[in-house]
Image: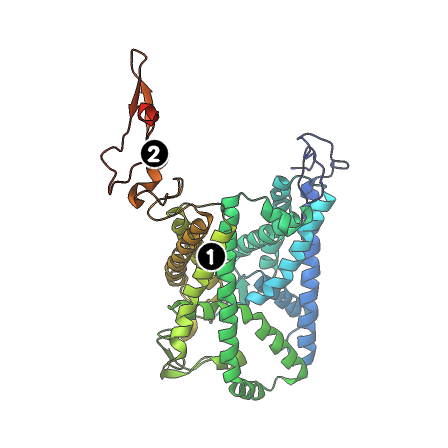
Amino acid sequence: MTSTGLGARRVSGGVSTTAPGGEAGGADRSLLVIGAIAAAVVSASGLAAVILVVLIGWIAAPHAGAGLPAVLRSSAALWLVGQHVGFSYRGAGRIGLLPLGLVVLPGALLWRAGRWVVRTGQVQRLRHVGYAALALAVPYAVLTGGLALASRSSLESSSLPQSVACGLVLALAAGGLGGAREMAPWPDLVRLLPPGPRSLVVGIAGALGALVVAAAVLAGASLAMHLSQAATLERDLSPGVIGAVLLLLLQLGYVPNAIAWAIAFMVGPGFAFGVSTVVAPTGSALQHLPAFPMLAALPLGLHASMPAWVTPVVMAMPYLAGGLGGVLLVRAAPPLSLDAAPLWGLASGAVCGLLLGLLAAASGGPLGDGRLAAVGPSAWQVGLVSALEIGIAAAAAAGAANYLALRRAGAVSGLSWPGRAPSRPDLAPPFAARAASTSTTTPDETGHVIYLDPWAGDWQGGHRPPPSGPSALP
């Protein structure tokens, strides 16, 4: 798999126009070699950054019995956590509740690596960016699996299949997006989509963006209301200066998880923090929580989750987000028929439900085999309920917005439908659209022309169309 034969040259806007088989100067360098070099650089640089952070914590904290080999193994395990790879502790069980914010570091490095592979490999056709992303992702997944084996110890181990799969998916996504961005700016890439899929993407992005903003506001407000409890927990931990900085970084890493949980809360199913616990708009039932400052935002005990007047506002957010997505979908779509617009809204809701279900699955996970074995939202419940709520709201909003757009354009009037002529004021409304085809001329077998009025018995109230044929003659 090389960049030879990708021959095309980039023009302004990133759209290639030359025919296949053109020369791509210097394209004799193998994409696999370039991708392997980029994957090695990403792994080495990211691991070096993590080792630096772990070394700071190792120096600042008591480390009796823990030498540099343990530091290196811990750094490799933490780098795997950044790929969203869980691990198991002997006697404690599996740890799967991982901070989604740590994915930013490897994601940003892979983004830059994808751009470098496309630029260095002289990939000049947009459809060949996938080859460049694959050339980066395969060696990166192999290196990630190697780190999973190298970081194993008698106490901790990471799953090899999960390490390879997460490394491959992350490199394909981040590297592919980076490579596509190297080819052209985002507006040009979006305009390359057909009108239908482009409008669907706009509607989905609008609905998800509104939901994320509302969830961030909800999570931030809850934490602000319990800020004193969070400060008390941090003082009780006594982390010191360096420990406080590391604790702050860890909490920032869990901010995306908190937003995902707030979305699950607004949608309705809520989330759990332990076996037989729930935090939902209808109420919460929580037991003792770990001493982590961010968890002060969760209400302990058995009572209502929030004031009664806030509950309908929070539960209305998914419907408002779906309505916004439906309106944006219609505004970005080509002309739609009256029955097609709601179907497009339902399709956007289904895709939103799928994406939110995946986000819910990634935001939770077990904290051992005991009471905290169930932490986070249920992926299938969040996905199903959000697809219904967002889909129904988007369908209704898209149908209404599309009808108003057609009415303003004159494509819909009275009881007539798109594609028929607007009604005439001098004709009865049910038959106004038929005025254009009132009379037809049909030659018979002898060649004589027969004038026929197919709606002769339908005209009511004395209103008839203008005469045609011989009767129209003076």
Residue occupying the point 66% across, 39% down: 125
Question: Which of marks 2 and 1 precedes in the sequence?
Answer: 1
> Circle 2 — which element?
loop
Residue occupying the point 30% across, 44% down: 428
Residue occupying the point 52% across, 74% down: 217
Would you identify the image quadrant in which residue 238 lies? bottom right
Q: In this view, does 462 lie above or below 408?
A: above
| Residue that numbered label 1 is attached to | 327
Residue 144: x %, y % from top left: 60, 55
Q: In this view, does 230 lie above or below 186?
A: below
Residue 27: x %, y % from top left: 74, 37
> Circle 1 — which element?
helix
Most foreground residue, 373 or 346: 346
Question: Label 1 sits on what residue type?
Answer: Val
Q: Real-space Cα distance between discs 1 and 2? A: 42 Å
Name the side, left or right, on which 215 lies relative to 150. Answer: left
Please, which residue is most extreme toward the right here? 26
Of labels 1 and 2, the one closer to you: 2
Residue 452 appears in the picture as rendered:
yes
Would you identify the image quadrant in which residue 422 lies? top left
Residue occupying the point 32% across, 29% down: 439
| Residue that numbered label 2 is attached to | 466
